[in-house]
Image (cartoon, rainbow, N blue to C red):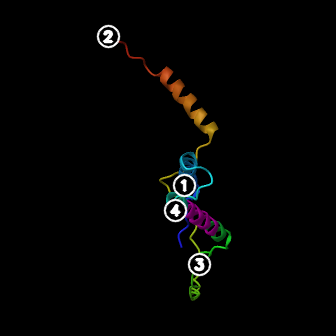
Amino acid sequence: MPIRTATLARQIRKNGARLHLAMMARIHSHGADQPPSAQETALLEKRRSLKEARAQRQAQAKLPRQKPVRWVSEAHPAHAPKAPKAPKPPKKPKEATAAKGTKVSRHDKLIRKAENLEAAKKAQKKSAKT
């Protein structure tokens, strides 16, 4: 059942205003001791029915609501265990290749650099004219 969000308060208020106008018109023209007119009785009946409907809605709102059904997923069947893998053969140790060569230390690099500088200084300088 859908939840009703509209209220009857505005309809009751409008009905009460119309009823008040009808009563004042009757009292002003015929006097207070005269019986209510047909319009007044119709408005009174409508007001009574609106108030009963409001009371029913309020009573229904206090009742516990039906909770949504919880989703229950089915259990999946268990998977068969996997077969154990065969152990890998051990790796062969890498051999030093001639292409890579051995690592030169920093000290050797500095010595080689100094020797190259001295050789460049001692080399025969070329003149700009020749």
Q: Amino acid at mark 2?
A: Lys
Q: Give me the C-alpha separation between circle 1 and circle 4.
A: 10 Å
Q: Can see residue 102?
A: no
**What residue is shown with label 2?**
129
* Rendered residue at 57%/81% (across/down): 73
Percent across and percent down for residue 41 are 54, 61
Q: Give me the C-alpha separation between circle 4 and circle 2.
A: 129 Å
The stretch of residues the image draws in magenta is 44-56
Q: Disc 4 vs disc 2: which is toward the camera?
A: 4
Q: Quadrant of residue 118?
A: top right
* Rendered residue at 56%/67% (across/down): 3
Q: Give me the C-alpha separation between circle 3 and circle 1.
A: 42 Å
Identify the secondary structure beneath mark 4: helix
**What residue is shown with label 3?**
69
Q: Amino acid at mark 4?
A: Ala
Q: Disc 3 vs disc 4: which is toward the camera?
A: 4
Percent across and percent down for residue 12 are 57, 56
